[in-house]
Image: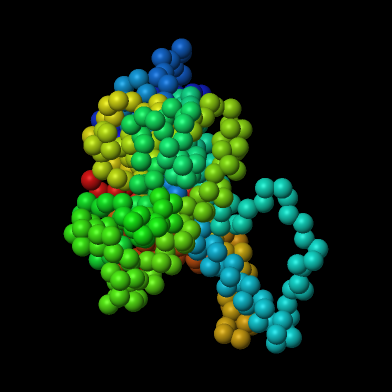
């Protein structure tokens, strides 16, 4: 089960404890809630010379989801796990929309910002906002976990695939390629590229075999661009036929396979563009960093007979992975990046003119839109207890959105802040 982080009165990091132990400390008045997400308690006293165990945070970066796991290398226990959902695509869409509106204003000769594409300079290592947000999200949560848990090392999946090993499988002088990991790099790449399904029939959830698109008997090679995945029936049926003869009755599928064979991986390209920037920023934290590959991660997960999830992939990153991982009962925290609102001062109509007044100050009566609150309404139509995200109004009459829906007209006097808005939303994945 996911552990609860503990700090003392001086905010000194202590060993995470079992949730039952945390409930005893809270009910007895020896501790109080410090943070809701991730759940952290603070003791009411100072712990002199605490005996803390070293933990390692493991990171499996992804284009859309990044897996995070805090592992005790000595015992193999996964103390905490989380999956961080990025908003890179929404940032890219918003920037494109803003660019289109700006271009429309220029075409219509209305008020607009003059072009600035000739007087801009970009710093060395500049990344697009959608890629920069991924790095900032990961760095933010690594720093938060370091401040709450005695973490002494970092494991990072630096590359998704070992491209050198894929181009030359007979490479010599590299010990890991000659060992039991041979073939894992290439197969993991193909699984990502062909969406884990048969290229010829589209079957999913079946054993897949590496297939040569152009058979070797007809001049085909072992290059990655000539490989795909096929189920056993399709592989046997195709045999040594040319793919154009095999799929002559399915021209659309033939065209898709030939195009996809040479197409790059968009998500892998996004991760590849940010990997070194993320590595350098994590290195600046001062903790030793262990690097691994996606093929090695899959090898560790497969040999330990674990299912494929983002947080389990994170727990299997690197050669430091314990032989036996204790993952029973761990429920990962789902963290979604939602941002801090929009910089747009007012909403526009379809012609690009303001249709609302300028937005007011964010805090209202000590609350802000996005805060998680508990409201206990004693009387009236909305009598009851509500826990959820609040949408503030200048009048002091708020809306609260929970899993049961949205309740309107809750007075600010009945609300108590549980967790301040920090640009993320949280949920617990069901087992």
* Depicted 361 relative to depicted 60: above or below: below
All told, the count of numbered labels is: 0
**Residue drawn 59% across and 67% down?**
95
Residue drawn 37% across the image and 66% down it? 257
Q: From what the image shows, is residue 37 above or below residue 14?
A: below
Residue 298 is situated, as x and y percent measured from the top left of the image, at 34, 40
Where residue 76 sits in the image (x, y, percent)? 31, 25
> Which quarter of the figure is the N terminus placed in?
top left
Give the side of residue 209 with respect to residue 168, left or right.
Answer: left
Q: Residue 300: name its quadrant.
A: top left
Which residue is located at x 36 percent, y 41 percent?
183
Q: Nearer the viewer, residue 293 or 38?
A: 293
Q: Nearer the viewer, residue 205 or 379?
A: 205
Front-lying residue, 104 or 315:
315
Report the coloring of the rendering: rainbow
Q: Can I make out residue 32 in this image?
A: no
Residue at figure coordinates x 77%, y 74% from the top left: 114
């Amino acid at each position: 089960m996911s552990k609860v982080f503990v700090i003392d009165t001086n905010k000194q990091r202590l060993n995470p404890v079992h949730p039952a132990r945390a409930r005893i400390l809270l009910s007895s008045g020896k501790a109080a809630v410090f943070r809701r997400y991730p759940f952290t308690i603070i003791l009411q006293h100072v712990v002199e010379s605490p005996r803390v165990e070293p933990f390692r945070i493991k990171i499996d970066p992804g284009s859309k989801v990044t897996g995070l796991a805090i592992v005790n290398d000595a015992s193999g226990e996964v103390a905490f796990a989380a999956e961080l959902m990025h908003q890179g695509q929404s940032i890219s869409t918003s920037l494109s929309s803003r660019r289109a509106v700006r271009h429309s204003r220029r075409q219509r000769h209305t008020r607009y910002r003059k072009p600035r594409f000739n007087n801009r300079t970009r710093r060395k290592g500049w990344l697009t906002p959608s890629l920069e947000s991924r790095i900032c999200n990961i760095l933010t949560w690594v720093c938060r976990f370091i401040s709450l848990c005695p973490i002494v090392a970092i494991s990072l999946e630096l590359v998704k695939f070992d491209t050198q090993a894929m181009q030359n499988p007979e490479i010599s002088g590299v010990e890991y390629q000659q060992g039991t990991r041979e073939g894992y790099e290439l197969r993991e790449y193909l699984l990502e590229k062909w969406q884990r399904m048969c290229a010829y029939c589209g079957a999913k959830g079946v054993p897949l075999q590496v297939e040569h698109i152009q058979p070797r008997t007809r001049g085909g090679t072992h290059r990655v661009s000539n490989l795909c995945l096929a189920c056993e029936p399709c592989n046997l049926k195709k045999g040594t036929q040319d793919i154009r003869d095999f799929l002559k009755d399915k021209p659309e599928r033939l065209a898709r396979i030939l195009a996809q064979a040479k197409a790059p991986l968009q998500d892998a390209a996004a991760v590849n563009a940010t990997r070194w920037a993320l590595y350098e920023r994590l290195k600046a934290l001062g903790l030793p960093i262990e690097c691994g590959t996606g093929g090695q991660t899959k090898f560790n997960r497969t040999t330990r007979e674990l299912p494929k999830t983002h947080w389990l992939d994170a727990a299997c990153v690197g050669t430091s992975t314990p032989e036996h991982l204790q993952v029973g009962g761990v429920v990962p925290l789902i963290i979604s990046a939602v941002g801090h609102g929009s910089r747009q001062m007012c909403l526009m109509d379809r012609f690009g003119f303001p249709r609302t007044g300028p937005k007011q100050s964010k805090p209202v009566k000590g609350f802000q839109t996005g805060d998680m609150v508990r409201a206990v309404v004693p009387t009236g139509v909305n009598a009851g207890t509500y826990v959820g995200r609040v949408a503030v109004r200048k009048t002091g009459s708020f809306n609260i959105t929970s899993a049961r829906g949205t309740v309107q007209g809750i007075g600010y006097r009945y609300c108590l802040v549980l967790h301040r808005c920090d640009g993320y939303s949280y949920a617990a994945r069901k087992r």
